[in-house]
Image: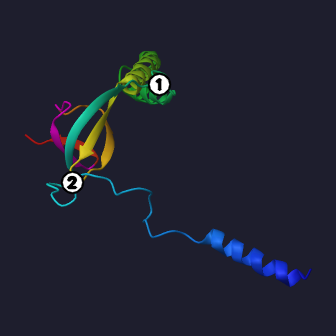
Amino acid sequence: MNLRSLFIPALCIGLAACATGGNRGYGYGPPPAGPSQNVRCYDCGVVERIETIYGNSSASGGGAVLGGIVGGVLGNQVGKGDGRKAATVVGAVGGAVAGHQIEKNVKSAPTYDVFLRMDDGRRIVINQRDLANVAPGDYVRVTNNRIVPLR
């Protein structure tokens, strides 16, 4: 048997395997249903649900360092001689403790994931520190990655 007589059928089978059906776009199935022509506002949508995300209450130490520096500088402004030295030490220690606690409180504050169904059919999630007086079902606008109620 000739090698050429095996090559041509194999080439035809390989090319047939590469052929595709009709042009169906980038996805499979029909295009998503939803408003396409009657979009009221590109940046507007309805709040579907809100989830509270609790932060990590650990601190990196940056708050303590910064608080210690600020406390030491402020303590150094008080008194003269040994009194000034003592005030600097007390200010640094007090500032470090306060800075550590402030950092812990900021990191452990909850944030909110707000799930939105936009007017054009998109679904997005915005994470922010406050709810801006919104609840599920409210119509809102997204401005600078923040939710603004439209009432």
Q: Nearer the viewer, residue 31 or 89?
A: 31
User: Does the residue at mark 2 contact the one at mark 1 (Cβ under 8 Å)?
Assistant: no
Kind of residue at badge 2: Pro
Does 139 appear in magenta?
yes
Quarter of the image containing the N terminus?
Answer: bottom right
The residue that appears at 32% across and 28% down in the rendered structure is 51
Kind of residue at badge 1: Ala
Does 150 appear in magenta?
no
Query: Measured from the top left, where is residue 32 in percent x and y?
Result: 32, 53
Q: Identify the mark nearer the N-term, 2 or 1.
A: 2
Q: Nearer the viewer, residue 137 or 114?
A: 137
Residue indicated by mark 1: 64
- Drawn side of residue 15 relative to residue 93, left or right: right
Residue bounds of the magenta highlight: 133-144
The residue that appears at 44% across and 57% down in the rendered structure is 28
User: Residue 67 occupies which quadrant of the picture?
Assistant: top left
Query: Measured from the top left, where is residue 90 in percent x and y?
Result: 44, 16
Quarter of the image containing the C terminus?
Answer: top left
Disc 2 on helix, strand or loop?
loop
**Mark 1 crowd level (few <14, some 14–19, many ≥20, 10 Å Cα):** many
Looking at the image, is 49 positioned above or below residue 88? below
- Drawn side of residue 5 relative to residue 109, left or right: right
Question: Is residue 39 something that shows in the picture?
Answer: yes
Q: Which is more foreground, mark 2 or mark 1?
A: 2
Residue indicated by mark 2: 35
Q: Residue furthest left?
A: 151
